[in-house]
Amino acid sequence: MLGLLALPLGVFAPFAIWSGVRSLRRIRASGGELRGGASAGGGLIAGLIGLATFLIGTAYWLIAS
């Protein structure tokens, strides 16, 4: 969910990245008991895209103004 929010609202990107990494670690450590690795990975990727977009947009705004 945070990954989806991170795409239009870059403020949520660090939380999406943190949550995705934490979830992936817990899933891998569970030995197959927990599922959802694809969702956690998707949230992590969306968070990274949101963060990159936010940083590039902010840099462009600062340079252009």
Image (tube, grey):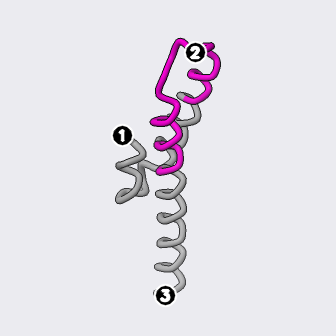
Gap between marks 1 and 3 measured at Cα = 32 Å
Q: Earlier in the sequence, mark 2 or mark 1?
A: 1
Density class for disc 1 (Cα within 10 Å; few <14, some 14-19, many ≥20) is: few
Q: Earlier in the sequence, mark 2 or mark 3?
A: 2
Relative to 39, residue 51 above or below? below
Residues at marks 2 and 1 touching, judged by CB atoms closer than 8 Å = no
* Of the two numbered discs 1 and 3 in the rendering, the one whose residue sits closer to the viewer: 1
- Disc 1 residue type (three-letter): Met
Q: How many labels, in total?
A: 3
Relative to 27, residue 5 above or below? below
Query: In terms of image quadrants, where is residue 22?
Result: top right
Q: Which residues are magenta?
A: 24-46
Local SS, label 3: helix
Rendered residue at 48%/41% (across/down): 15
Rendered residue at 52%/44% (across/down): 44
Tell which of 65 and 8 is nearer to you.
8
Q: Is residue 37 left or right of residue 2?
A: right
Q: Is residue 5 left or right of residue 26?
A: left
Q: Earlier in the sequence, mark 1 or mark 3?
A: 1
Q: Report which residue position mark 3 lands on.
A: 64
Local SS, label 1: loop
- Disc 2 residue type (three-letter): Gly
Relative to 23, residue 30 above or below? above
Gap between marks 2 and 1 measured at Cα = 23 Å
Percent of width and height locating residue 38: 50, 36
| Mark number displayed over residue 19 | none
Q: Report which residue position mark 2 lands on.
A: 32
| Mark number displayed over residue 1 | 1
